[in-house]
Each structure stands twice: as structure tokens, then as C-alpha cells.
Amino acid sequence: MADTSIVEHVKRTKSLVFTVTPGRSGTKYLAVPLGGVPGVSAYHEPQPDFATYMRAAQTKSEAAYAFWLYAKLPFIAAAPGAIYAETSHLFCKGFLEPALLLGLRPGLIILRRAASQVAWSLLERQTVPARSDFGKKYLLSPEDPGVMPLPGWQAMTDYQLCFWYALEIERRQIRYAEYARRLEMPVVEVLQRDLGKPQVFKRMLETLGLAADDKVMMHHSLAGAGQHYKNARSLQKPDDLEAQESRVWKAILTYEPFLAETIMDKYAPISVAA
């Protein structure tokens, strides 16, 4: 099966679910309870991995299309079950738009964790945008086209680059949630800190049109509340992190004047029935 015929085959036979997330936000954990839903094949970052083509996809959209057509979609087509769920943080880095233009309409889980927490976790893992090997492979860079500009980033600290990256993903989460609503795709927004809450998980499944019976909820409870995997290396936080973050906010203010306000609203306490 080649070219767009694989797209039509997947559209006929599969429902898709992907996450829009910065990473370090519970994606590996989330794949476990999702895998307990009847008919769902759930993966974290399976091969073929979006990371293989992520860097090329930033400047060459044809790389993303080729990955979908000749690697990812054949893998999805061969996966068991009628529902394919993948919790990779790479999906939102150059692959969502090509998927939509191919006619795919996946459900989206907008998975958030506070930008400062994401940034520090990345720093502890030596995963720094545009600088470290892991950062170059897995994260967006201020040099990439289509990202939120960060004037003077070359002189900024590693933490500031990680913080900018987390804000860039927040920006994409807002935009992609709007895409989903416009295209009438299922979309659910959830905070990493709430992943272990049964009522939140049940609401997520119901929004995505997935089964949320007692057996599924029991599997969720047995998966544990380990919402992200701790770093092996722990760093001592400096006293000036707030000042470092303020410099990043000031640098992006002209481009995204309302981003801070919008993000704050997303982290407000939620009210869900028990």
C-alpha cells in the first residue's frame, strides 16, 4: 500500500488519538491506562518514531509527509484494535499540520505541565534547545521557522532556552486546540498533575469517545499516579529563576502579548464531579 491509499485505509479502519505536550508531562504514564481501554493500542514513543524526521520536518514539509505515508501510517494500520493512541511529545513539532492536510482527524489530548517545571526537568536531563545533543534532536529551537521569536537567545542561559521551549509548546497547545474545535475533532485539555484523578481520566475518555467502564477505571487505578518519571540527576535551583523567566517573557511580549494571561487561565483549578 503506497501514497495516499494508506491514508484512506487508516481513515476507514482506525480512530486516532495523539497528545500535544512538551514532554516531561506524564506521557509515558498516560500510555499505560490508555492501553487498558478496549480496542485501544496505546504507545508512548514507538518505532517508527517522529524524532527520526522531526529536525528535517522543521524546514522541509515533504519530510513530514513522507514519514506519515511510508512509516507511521503503515505502522498504525498494522496495529491491533480499531483505536490507535500515541503519547509522543514529537507529534506537535511539524507533524500535526501535515496530518490534517492529509485528511486525518485525530482526537487530541492537550497535556499541560507548568512551563517552569518542564524547563527545570529538561535542564536536569541536559536537554537544552539548540545546544545539547538531546535538545537538538527532540526539542524545537529558536532558529526553527514558525516558532515564537526569542530575540537575543544566543546570550541567554540554558534554563531560559528550556523555559522558552515550554512556552512555545503552550502556544501550540492553544492554537491546536482551536484547530480541533474548528474541524470538530475530539479535544480534551488536562493538566499533568490531574492525570491520576479517576474523574479526570474518565472525562478524558468520554470526550474522546472511548470506553470508561469499571474495568477500565480499575486499570487506571492500578497504573498508579506516577505521572512523570523522575530525573536521575538533581540540580540545585539558583535564586534568580524568576528573573530569568521575566527576561524571556519580555523578549516574546511583542510577538505574543496575551500568552501569559491565557496560560494562567489554563492552570486555574478545575471542578469535576466525583
Image: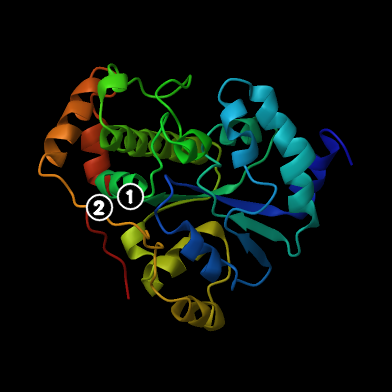
- Identify whether 149 is placed above or below 243: above
Q: Quadrant of residue 175?
A: top left
In this view, the residue farthest toward the right is: 1
Q: Which residue position is annotated with label 1?
A: 124
Q: How many marks?
A: 2
Mark 1 or 2, nearer chain start: 1
Image marks 1 and 2: residues in contact by CB distance under 8 Å: yes
Secondary structure at numbered mark 2: loop
Q: Residue at x 38, y 66 (%)?
A: 200
Q: Residue at x 33, y 37 (%)?
A: 162
Q: Quadrant of residue 197?
A: bottom left
- Identify whether 159 is placed above or below 124: above
Camera sees residue 220: yes
**Whole-number angstrom distance, CA of label 1 to CA of label 2:** 6 Å
Q: Residue at x 43, y 20 (%)?
A: 143
Q: Quadrant of residue 39?
A: bottom right
Q: Residues within 10 Å of mark 1 (few under 14, many from 20)?
A: some
Q: Residues within 10 Å of mark 2 (few under 14, many from 20)?
A: few
Residue 79, position in %: x, y?
75, 59
**Which one is in front, 102 or 184?**
102
- Identify whether 271 is placed above or below 171: below
Camera sees residue 206: no
Q: Which residue position is annotated with label 2?
A: 235
Secondary structure at numbered mark 1: helix
Residue 11, position in %: x, y?
75, 46
Q: Amino acid at mark 2?
A: Leu
In the rendered image, the quadrant that contains the C terminus is: bottom left
**Which one is in front, 183 or 130?**
130
Q: Amino acid at mark 1?
A: Glu
